[in-house]
Structure formats: C-alpha cells, structure tokens
Amino acid sequence: MNRWIIPYIHLYKGRMSLSVIYGLLGVTSGAMLLFVSGYLISKSSLRPENIMIVYVPIVAVRAFSIGQALFPYLQKLVSHDIVLRILSHYRQRLYDTLEPQAIFLQSRYQTGDILSILADDIEKLQDFYIRTLFPSIIGIVVYGVLAVVFGFFDLPFMLMMLAFLGIIVFLVPFLSYKTMRRKHLAIKKKRGSLYQHVTDAMFGKLDWMVSGRVQEIVHQVAEDNKNLITSENKMKLWHHKREAILRFTAGIAIILVMVWSDAQTGSSISPTIIAAFVLMMFSVADALLPISEAVEEIPLYTDSIKRMEAFEEKDSMADLPAVRENIIWDRPAIHLDHVTYSYNRSAPPVIDDLSLTIEPGKKVAVLGKSGTGKSTLLKLLSGVIQPATGKIHLNNTEMSSHYLSSAVSVLNQKPHIFHTTIANNVRIGKPDASEEEIIAVLEQAQVMRMIDQLPGGIHTQMDEMGGRFSGGERQRVAFARVLLQDTPILLMDEPTTGLDPRTEHDLLVTILEAAKDKTIIWVTHHLAGAKLMDDIIFMEAGKVKLRGPHRQLLKTNNYYKQLYQMDEGI
Amino acid sequence: MKKQRVKKLPNYPGSLKTHSLLTIFILCEAVAIIAQAYFLARAITFLFDRMPIGEVIPDIGFFFVAFVIRYLITHIEMAAADKYAAKSAQMLRDRLMQTYFGRSHAFVRQIGIGHLVTLAMEGVDHVKRYVEIIGVRMIKTAVIPAFIVIFVFLYDPISSVILVLAVPIIVIFMILLGLAAQMMADRQYETYTRLSNHFIDSLKGLETLAYLGKSREHAKKIEQVSGDYRNATMRTLRVAFLSTFALDFFTSLSIAFVAVGLGLRLIEGDITLLPALTILILAPEYFSPIKQVGKDYHATLDGQLAMQEIDNLISTEESRQTNEQTELFDWQQDSVLTFDKVTVGIAEKKLLDDLRFNIRTGWNGIIGASGSGKSTLINVLAGLLLPTDGSIQINDQPVSSLKNESWFEQIAYIPQAPYVFPLSLADNIRFYALDASDEEVQQMIQEIGLEDLVRSFPAGIHEKIGEGGRSISGGQEQRIAIARALLSGKPVILLDEPTAHLDIETEYEIKQLMLRVFKDKFVILATHRLHWLKQLDHILFLESGELKHQGTHEQLMNQSGNYVSFVRWGKEESG
C-alpha cells in the first residue's frame, strides 16, 4: 500500500487539493442552492414591500445552480487527469520491474496470462483514487466545514452534531471496511473454486463423459455456483442494511437541525433560516453517505498492490544490456569452457560442465528432451545469463549481453508481433534502419512478394484484418527483424513450432539461404532438416550426449538412425 | 461478427412477479416521497410561523416516519431486484453447463472454450449486475416523476409546467452532447485503441524486445505513449463529461427557476408558504430518477452484450437429436464399426462428406494433411460431434449417434494436450476408474515409465499436479493419459495427433510405449506423422473431408493417387 499509493499522493498533492476543492465547491453549491432557496421562499412569504430584498437571493440561487453543475464537472476532469498521470507512472514502474525478468516470465508463469492481469491491476488502481480517495476526503472536509458553520452559532450543538454525524463519517465506514474485508475474502475463495471447476468441466469435457462422471461435475459446479451466489447475496443484504442505517441517521440529523434552528430563532438567527438549514442538511448528507461505500473497496485494491509488490521483490538473474558496444565482429568462433549453470542451488545444474566449440559459419541443430538444458544453453549463448562457473568466449572476448544485436541475434520461440506496421515491426531491432534496408531483409525472408500485394505495402498494420497474415508469414516478418541486425551469429529457439510440415520446411530453407554466411544455432524438437545442418547435438542432463554431422551419425550411431528413420517416416 | 445488445427488460423466470412487485413498491415509494416532503414543509412552515415546538412534533414525527419508510422501501426494492438477479445468474450458469454437456461440440469450436469459461464466470456477473439495476431504474423513471408532477400540478400548475418542460430540453441536449462525444470518440478511435493497447502489447513483447537488445530503450517509448494516451483521453473526457454536466446544469437550473418563480409569486401573494416549500422539496426528487439514467453506462453495456450472447447460446435448440439412448452394446474383439454415408456439415460447408467404411479391432489410422477433416472425424468418433446425415452401425446394429453412454463406456480419448486436472497424480491416473487402489496405480506407473517422476515428488503419487501444483512436461502428460486409458480397461482408444508436438526422442519413446500397451485394443489414430503408417492395419486417407483411399499402407502405395504423393512429399520434407 505504502509504496504504490503514498508517493503518488505526495507527487500530486497540488492537483489533488484542487480536485478536492472543486468537489467541495460542488457540494457547497448544492447545499447553498437549497439553503438560499429555502431562505428565498421563507423571506418572500413575508411579502416584503420591496422586491429588491430578495434580489440577491434570486441571483444567488441561479449562481449556485450553475456552480452545482460546473464544479463536479471540473472535479471529474481534474481527478481523471491526475489518475492518468499516475497511471503513466505505474506503467513505467511496472515495465521497469518486469523488464529485467523478461526472459524468465514465460517459464516462471506458464499458466494464466499474468501480464494481462498486471496491466489490469494498474488500471484498477485508478479507481482507488476516483472512487475511494477523493470521495472520502471530500466527505471529511465537508464534515469539517459543517463543524465550523455550526460552531459559529453554537458550540455545544456543534459537538453534538460532530459526534452524531461521526457515525456516518467514521463509525459505519470503519465497520464496513472490517466486514467487507472478511466477506471479500470469502467471496474470492468461492469464486476461485467455481472458476476451477468450470475450467475442469469445460476443458476436460470428454474425460468426464467417458468416465460417466458428468453428473458429478455438473453438480459440483451447481454447488459452487450456489455457494458463490449465496455469499454475494449476504454481502448485498449487508449493503442494504448499512445504507438503511445511514439514512436513518441522516434523517435524525435533519430533525436535530430543525429543532435546533427553531430554538435558535429569535436569539442568533431569524426564522427565515429554519427552512434554509433544514434543506441544506439534505445536500450535506448526500456528500457524507458515500464514504462507507468508498472505504469498503480498499480490500480490492490491496490484492492488486500485493501482486505487484511480489514482482518487485523477485530478483532477475538476467543481465540485459543497458549499453551496447558497437564492435564490428568478424565471424567469431564460439567457445564454451567448462560451463555450469543452475537456476537454484538445491537443484542439479541445468548445464553441467559443458565444453564446446562452434566454428564460424557452422549450422548446428540442438536437440534434447524437455528439461535437458537446450533453452538454457541458448540463453547462455545470448549472454542474458552468465555461467555460474566456466567461461563463454566469442573469439577472445568474453560473452556478455552487450553483444546482443551486434554479435548475436536471437529468434525466440514465440517472437511477438507488435500492433504496428510491418515496417515498424522489422525496425524494432534496429531503429535507424532505412526503408530500403527493411525491404531488403523482407525480401531475404521471402515475404516481400506477399507484402507488395497489400494496399499499404510495408506500412500495413500487422493486426489489421485479422487473419491476413498466416503463422508462417508472421514468422518470416519476425525473422526479417532479426536479419536486419545483421549479426554473425543467429540463435533460434524452435522458430518453426506450431507450423504445419510444409510451411515449416519452406521457412527453414528460407532461413538457411538468407543466413548462409552466419553461424546458426538452432534448437529444435525433431529432425526435419537435419540433413541441411553441419552438426547435430543431442543434449541430456546439461551435457552433450551425442554430437556429429548428420551423415556420420547416420552411419555410426544406431540410436540416431532409429530416430531419423522415424522422423523421416517410411 | 457484429455484437448485438438487448435493451429490453430481462425476461428470466420470475420476471413478471419481480417487476410487478417492484412497480407496487415504487408506487409506495412515490407516495412516501410526497408524504415526506409534505410533512417536512408543514413542520418548517409551522415553526416559521412561531408555533410552539410541542405542536409541531406530530408533523416532525410524520416526516420522519415517511422518510424512514421511503428508504426502507428503496432498499426492499433493491433487495428484490438483487434476489431476482441472483436467481437469474444462478440459473444462467447452470443452464450454460447443461448446454455445454448436452450439445455437440460444434458451437464450442466456434467460440472457443476459453471464451466459454469467461462467459460462464464474468459474463454471468455482468448480466447479474445489469439485472440488479435495470428493472428498478426503468420503472422508477416511469413512475416517480409522473406522480410528483401530478401532485405539484394540483398545488401549483405553473411549477409543474416548468418541471415538465425541462425534460425534453434535457433530453435534446443530452442527445446532442452524446452525439458530439460519440463523433469525437469515433474520430479518435484508432489513435485511442493504439495508445491504450500499446502498454499491454509492450509487456507481451517484452521477451522479444529483450532478445533484440531493445528492452531498455523501449522504456522511453512507454513514457511517451502514456503521455499521448493521457492527452487523447482527456480530450474525449472533456466532451464525454459534458453530458453529465448538461444534465446537472439543466436540472439545477430548473430547480432554481421553480424556486425563483415560487418566491416571486409568494411576494405577489398568489401562493402560500406551505405549498411553495413542498414543491421546492419535491423538485430535486422529480429529477433524481432521470439523472440516474445515464449512470453506469459500461455496466449496462457489458450486461446487455453478455445477456444477448448467453441467451443465444442456451436458447438455440439443436435440431432434434435424441441424446438419451437405450441401446446397449459392448465392444468385443470381433466387433465391427461401420460408417455408412456419414456426412457432417451442410451444403457447401461439408466438413466430412459421405464417409463409408468398416473398421475393427487393431490399429486404424486417419491420415491426411491439416484441414482434411481428421479432427472432425475423430470428434464424431468420440461422440463430440453428431453426423448431419448417414448412419453409424456397431455389429450391423444401427446406433443413432456415438454420443451415447454405452459408447462412452468403451472409449478413452488422448488428444495432443490431455487435460491435467488439479488433483494428485494418482487421482489423475484413476480418473476413469475411481475404485482403483494405490497399488494398482503404482503398478500402472511402472508400466508406463513414470517412476522417475514419482521419485522426484516429495508426496510420491499423491503429489498435486496441474494448475497450482507441479508442472509436468508434454511427454509426461501423454504418459498420464495413457495410464488413465489403460487402468480403466477400455477397449477403444482414440488418439488425436498424440506425439507431433513432442521432441523426437520423447516421441520415439511414447510411440514404442503406445504400440506395446495398446497392442490388442481397437485403436483409432489421427495423425499427419508418416512414421505411424507402417504400424497401421487399416488406413483411412482423407482429403478435403472426403475418404479418398482406404486399406493397408502397401495397398495404398500400389494405387496411383494422392496418398502416394502425400507420402512422397512428406518423405522429401523430412529428409
């Protein structure tokens, strides 16, 4: 709470005060509109000889009626401007938090779309300011102003009213917060259970059917559903009870004011003010009542904040480039010298004492079962993680992520296609690239012919018209992006996964053709195209299990031969 | 697909009762509002006339009673609406589940299971929220202002004319401003969505940016775009909020008009204080329901959209298909499954066209390129899709469809990504055979080669896997699904592309395992991976939904036709 809210209140205290002032002026205008109207009518009923006596109230009524509309409008604009400014800070902050963990997000959070959840979280926090903070502050300030007004006439009555309205301003909101925190937790739990069972039912539909257990899950979901709805009903009922209590209190306050102002007439105020005070109390009550509702939402925001704080506490392990060194690399060889790496100390190393040399220009395929370390090897080679022991060298220079995009470029498993034009998508890897360069790499990726047929050419939005780009075409654009960085070494993490065999094969041929002078290290899960590679490496438990050129392995290694025959088919 | 929205009152069971009840309550509320104003005005007038407070107490008392009753009724109304909404929401969720299990799989493929889950959870929530507010709001808007204005008319026709005239002016301005805001929003729509999506787009592309070495530089872009986003949003909001402003402005101006008019006529002596005060107190109440109309715009919109979508889903009846069937059959070693002129889809959109074949125990393959209808056929065989035409026979006995309890008892289905339930490993394995003992599960784990995995779990076979538990690899998922099928002893095994996504070594192991453990089963395997072909006893070769060839691999290779080129091409590709 402290770290995600307080600093921003400090930062924008000026604007926030302005918003509260507008809010207060809005409430005041409303109260004064009724106050002056009541006064106007009472005064008029005395049938003054001179209409000029009620002239000022008449003008005031009109002025306050404009104010009652204008100030809330200004208040809304100012407060939305504030939350948008804060949102911008939140985005920046969330990005800065996630950026160092970028390459681990995928593996750490396989399930659920954590990124969308976080983005939603910061959007939700806007409501904290709009719906909780500002209404509460305005309510409390109105309470204070009221105290001053009554105090001006009658100190004991002021104290009594303060105590009494304290029920609306402090007591009920406090109880509300306490109760809602509990109920909110209960509802969350029941929602979770329902969600899990709905997911189980829907994704496991056939499993339920073939096991004859459909009724079981349908009942389970119905049960969860009933529980959830019952809890929600209880919460609703509590809301209604609370609102009724608040109204009841407000009604008594109005009567107290009526009786009091009657008692005051003759001494400090004239009877014309009775109507004015009583009517004003209606408006004031309307400003105070929302506090309970505002406060009860706090538990909703604390969830969001906790989630983001949890991310801020993660250490990154990654080493991403802040500066890039623009060295011209001349076909470097890659040397791994007794490299070991593990994600946590208790587990066995993912890469275990691995030594390996890859000559410049070689095309190497890396295979292995899941968990054998092939993706980690790729991360090590790209420099975004550093070996725990041992060294990785490019020629004689020790590998670091500073050489990403100058020595090494990476085509990761699911390269993201951004919601922008084709040209901008390609340019991301090299912001100062000219249009000619972009067209050249798109041609090398053999996707230019298709792009030429688009009305907007390379300036067509990638996400426009949904299915216009097939999976293969999107991969080609992603590949062009990597090609544009023109590095001597190209790392690829299963770029062809999910494509059908023909598209996969065509893409592979394109890649090998376009990158024929480059070193390619290609993590893959099967042997399609193995023939086109210079070297095949099988990994197991962080070590090289098998290595050699395709032809040699086929001749000398029975295991490889079996695998190859299976992949080849017949 | 254009999204539709319903704008009428929701019409779920109990709707008539709830809405009649609400109307009665709201009528009572209108009376209470008027009584509250009337007695308050009386009390104030009497006090103003310097009557002793003791004589005014009854009026104060009546005011308070009316005031309390009014808010009591308000909350009873809301509670009634809530109850109706809760019942409707509960009913909708249950109906969605029943529809999902009762109907064939075709509609799920259209909208996606993920979306269906969202619809059942958040969609129903949206409907609930909408039903809670809409009934009360619509009836109130119709009843309360009318009541008040009639009452005011009886006292002071001039004020009632002001009140009545204010409404069309408000409506016209609201429409004009609404249109202006809409036009503005439309004009900015593209920029606006681009800017608002930029952040989530950047987060999703973070890994890619990191590998391009550009993630740090991109932070500046976030800041810049956030600024643009704020400016664009504020431009729209300035206009959008204007409509609320106009609403407030005209209502409070009308109240001011009424007040000033009353004041002037009081001076003239045309009216006395009591009615004047009553009208003044009633004026804000007159506008209050109207002011609510534009509120909660998003809740209303979301509710209407979700309501339409859910109603469409649960109301579309499937063309007469008897799901409850009494046919009983057992799959025996010598049983035959016959498809006779089986067709799925209509007219030009035929997913499967006139399939005729007999298959029996042994390894049967459904072979074809992607889009040839393999998955559709497997779905028909699994009872998830119903044929639109043709007949299916088991041992020459026609069955109306395979969506049939008896058939479900025979089959086990292993898709590319079997669903892993958030249960223990053991409970996942005995999912089809609940009464299997831990020992039997242990034995099965030996059989399918998951001992290493079990050994790495602190709780052994009772370790929780799936969502919220241990994550497991694709190969392990397949092994669990195989164990599930084996343990239940089901004779029919349906395999939908079970190995294509695995790495070659795991694929090899899983293939050997399947060949061994499913040796004597009635296996139907849909795949494009050629290495299975030689292991198949009978091949159904599909192309664009038609059965082009059938027979053993050798037989098909000797016929000239697309099967040969399919195999040839695949061979070239992988070699």
Image (cartoon, grey):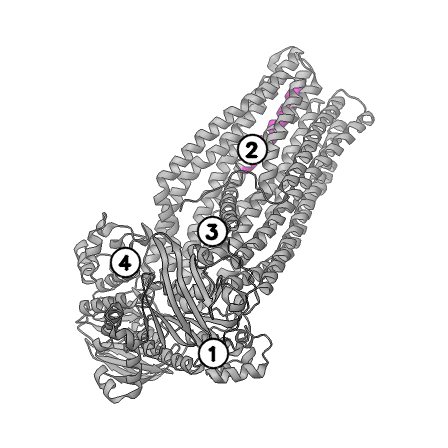
Q: Nearer the viewer, residue B476 or A549?
A: B476
Q: Position of residue B536 (x, y in %)?
A: 36, 77
- Gap between marks 4 and 3 measured at Cα: 27 Å
Q: Nearer the viewer, residue A281 or B26?
A: B26
Give the numbered dot on residue B333.
1
Give the numbered dot on residue B164.
none
The residue type indicated by label 4 comes to Ile
Whichever of callouts 4 and 3 sits on the residue coming sooner in the sequence is 3
Answer with left or right where residue A410 lies relative to residue A192.
Answer: left
Which circle, 4 or 2, is nearer the viewer?
2
When asked about the image quadrant of residue A513, the answer is bottom left
Whichever of callouts 1 and 2 sits on the residue coming sooner in the sequence is 2
- Gap between marks 3 and 2 measured at Cα: 27 Å
Is there a contact, CB below 8 Å, between mark 1 and mark 4? Answer: no
Chain ID, mark 2: B
Q: Is residue A156 visible from the viewing direction of this image?
A: yes
Q: Nearer the viewer, residue A134 or B406?
A: B406
Quarter of the image for the C terminus of chain B: give it: bottom left
